[in-house]
Amino acid sequence: MRCTNCNDTPCQEKDCSCGLYLNSDCINNVKAVFNCLNIETGLDLTQTLEAMDEALCERFESITNYFTLINTGIGAEVYKGVNLLGQKEIRKINTVGDLITVTQNTLDISISIDEDELTTFIQDNQLTVVIQNVGDGADILKTPATAGNETTYSLKSLKSENLGNGEAVFEGLQENTNDINFRFKSLKSNTLTISSDEEHVYIEQPENRPKCLFCSFFVQFGNDGVFKNISQKIMVIQLIFSGKTKQKTQDSGVKKVDLR
């Protein structure tokens, strides 16, 4: 390798290559003092460099472990990890859509719901529920009652009642898990014919049955010519079977009134 030595007059080129090559093992008794790394003096250069590498690695590892961050729980991980420079990396928080807002403050981050956007979203996507009475029957649904944000739809209870003094036809209500049964007694007769269609029930006298007619009755008067009480008005019933008459009368004082 040639170089110019301008200390000579005139300047002359000379050979500037090293005449002697040494490795680090040949440099003995390093006198430098390493107070921070705590490396002893008097070592050769190779030993000194190896001690420096070990001390630096231990210090870097201890610093890394001291500032350890971990993700806990089962949610999304905010802490990403350590990069090649030893820096702790934390993921940013972003939002999708307009319902949730993220605001970076001086000391914290605020995550909130935009109430105006939420109201608009509900109005655009809500399902409308309509409950009403239909048909011509009695209303089961009562007038809805609203208190604050809660609306209560009340239904009337079902109950049964047989009217009059005759034999009860309606048996009652049977409440099941998923429905309510209205129980009615079936009509049955040993002498009459009972039939029905989709809208009516027919109770008829068989055509081959002997006719039974209320042909005449007797009325009893008192001595003053006035009817006695109603239980004593009809005293005899005349039944006609195939043209034959059977009569049952009571004591005297009875006048016959024939309506035929």
Image (spheres, rainbow, N blue to C red):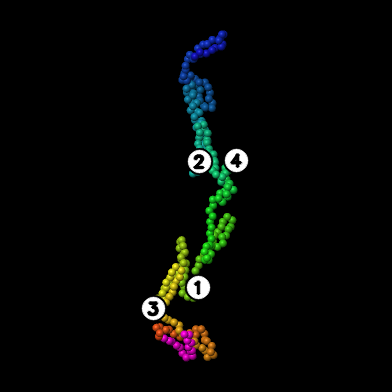
Q: Secondary structure at mark 3?
A: loop
Residue tagged by mark 1? 163
Q: Residue at x 53, y 89 (%)?
A: 225
Numbered range of the magenta stretch: 245-260
> Can residue 144 be seen in this snapshot?
yes
Residue 36, given in percent of the width and then of the height, sits at 54, 27
> Can residue 156 be seen in this snapshot?
no
Numbered mark located on residue 105 in the image: 4
Residue tagged by mark 2? 77
Q: Residue at x 60, y 39 (%)?
A: 106
Name the kind of residue labelled 3 in the image: Asn
Q: Secondary structure at mark 4?
A: loop
Residue 145, given in percent of the width and then of the height, sits at 57, 60
Depicted 79 relative to depicted 118: above or below? above
* Left or right of residue 205: residue 91: right
Which comes sooner in the sequence, label 3 or label 4? Answer: 4
The reply to whether dot 3 and dot 2 touch (C-beta < 8 Å) is no
Name the kind of residue labelled 4 in the image: Asn
The span from disc 2 to disc 1 (Cα, nearest Å) is 73 Å
Q: Secondary structure at mark 2?
A: loop
Which comes sooner in the sequence, label 4 or label 2? Answer: 2
